[in-house]
Amino acid sequence: MNDRDKALVEIKERLLILEEPNRKILGQVKRNIAKKYKLKDFPKNSEILAICDTEERELLLPILIKRIVRTLSGVAIVAAMTRPWECPHGKCIMCPGGPEIDKPQSYTGYEPTAMRGIRNNFDPYLQVTDRIKQLESIGHSTEKIDAIIMGGTFTNQPVEYQLWFIHRMFDAFNEIDSKDIQEAHKINETAVHRCIGLTAETRPDQINHEKINRLIEYGVTRLEVGVQSVFDDILEKMQRGHGVKETIAAFQFIKDTGLKITAHMMPGLPGSTFERDIESFEILFNDSRFRPDELKIYPTMVIPGTKLFQDFQNGEYEPLTNESATNLIAKIKELIPPYVRIKRVLRDIPAHQIAAGPNKSDLRLDVQAILEKQGKKCQCIRCREVGHIIYKKGTKIDQSKIDLIERSYEASEGVEHFLSFEETESDALIGFLRLRELSDNIIRPEFDKSTIIVRELHVYGELRGLQALKSGSLQWQHRGYGKELLSRAEEIGKEKDYSKISVISGVGVRE
């Protein structure tokens, strides 16, 4: 046993005898033992976890797990990048990348997922396997995976490629090759890494009956849609290639098939102003033709090699700054309804790749500081998730004060019912369910006028095993909240004279 191995064992044993080890003590123990054995660097948490047996791992995970926020929402995120492929309309003026420079469309190639894709030659099996191993090495459970297909407009890739890509992703989840995607889906129902959700990126004008039904057969449960703006003149200036009417039609298509929608919005585009950007988000949530389930806010960045970069150099475009973007997003957060989850407030592009525009990676924290100073808070799902509230604020949740709350609103010519369990005193969200009364536009053959659909069911808290029921303040899954939400959804269906309820679920939760 060499000195590093001896140090790892000693660190582990020192931590195990402590009554209440924490991360501060962990740092002290590492420092002292590294000095004792004259190590060149501190041992990594993943190295310590690697020498733990099952019982030791359970005891030490709370202090050794890195970036716990990655699984606080109850799932592990695994993304895979498709090969470089052009958009059907050409290229928007702010869009980097593209097959002509061997980079995925709309990506610089320096984003973490893009770099993983390049490193693995864009092979979906290798990318998924790589990411799962990485998450496990730093202590995260990967039993329940929310998978994302990135790389631009997935629905514009050839159909054969789409099928192959998703099939190989599932083979990676299952850790075994299968003859076709149907077999891969069946295996995944009881696999070690169950795919509980699958997301693909697309454009509003790339959604129709054929494409969306095909995605559902592949196992897709959510679409990220590049809305960018709700104003036609701005879409025209950015050379988007579609208008607002395509976005409205796409939203209805997606919701009426039971899928979730993540809208991408880009404040700061040419032709916009602070006031118009605020108005665009007011329209997004007040106009029933829109109202997405989730939101990614991507303040416009100026990337070298784009048409927007040329306009910026010629003095024809003035981008947002970190300060103006922060103030803008703080105002936007005040508008967010409690049924919407903000997933991002800035693109994951390294600062050295940004010529101008917002480039502060912790911009979300600055936004939060502004709201707190003003005595305001964001009502979005992410800011209220129980795991985040406990972990970040140290709030104690009183289970006796958890109530079932029902909110209903019109959306895309149908009616949405957002059912949630919340501890109102701390404003903590335990779990929720999205129930939809369809529009008159029936798209799926298994739906009819008597069908009401559950589009999403999610219980929050730190990702925990499907079998083991551990005691811990961050862990809320498998306590019966999901069953109660489903039961109430069924009651609403009966109250409104629906005879059938259809539950849209990921492949890995169909067992």
Image (spheres, helix red, strand yellow):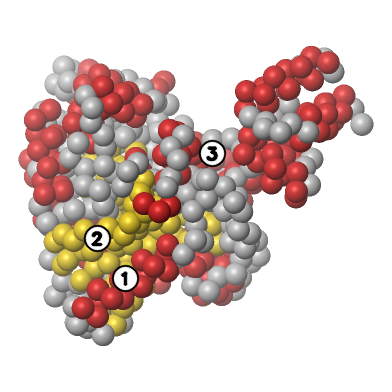
Q: Secondary structure at mark 1?
A: helix
Please state the horizontal and vertical placement of residue 350, each as a whole percent of the image. 42, 26
Please state the horizontal and vertical placement of residue 164, each as a whole percent of the image. 50, 63
Residue placed most toward the observer, 363 or 64: 64
Q: Residue at x 16, y 71 (%)?
A: 439
Tell me: residue 115, above or below residue 88. above
Closer to the eye: label 3 or 2: 2
Q: Are marks 1 and 2 in contact (CB under 8 Å)?
A: yes
Residue placed most toward the observer, 504 or 301: 504
Instruction: Using the numbered discs, state the Cα–Cα distance from disc 1 to disc 2 in whole angstroms.
Output: 10 Å
Residue receiving disc 3? 68
Please state the horizontal and vertical placement of residue 353, each as a whole percent of the image. 39, 24
Q: Which mark is residue 488?
A: 1
Tell me: residue 48, above or below residue 429. above
Density class for disc 2 (Cα within 10 Å; few <14, some 14-19, many ≥20) is few
Q: Secondary structure at mark 3?
A: helix
Residue receiving disc 2? 406
- Which quadrant would residue 211 be assigned to in this image? bottom left
The quadrant in which the N terminus is found is: top right
Residue type, label 2: Glu
Q: Secondary structure at mark 2?
A: strand
- Nearer the N terminus, badge 3 or badge 2? 3
Tell me: residue 278, above or below residue 141. above
Q: Residue at x 43, y 57 (%)?
A: 459
Tell me: residue 267, above or below residue 134. above
Instruction: Using the numbered discs, state the Cα–Cα distance from disc 3 to disc 2 in whole angstroms.
Output: 30 Å
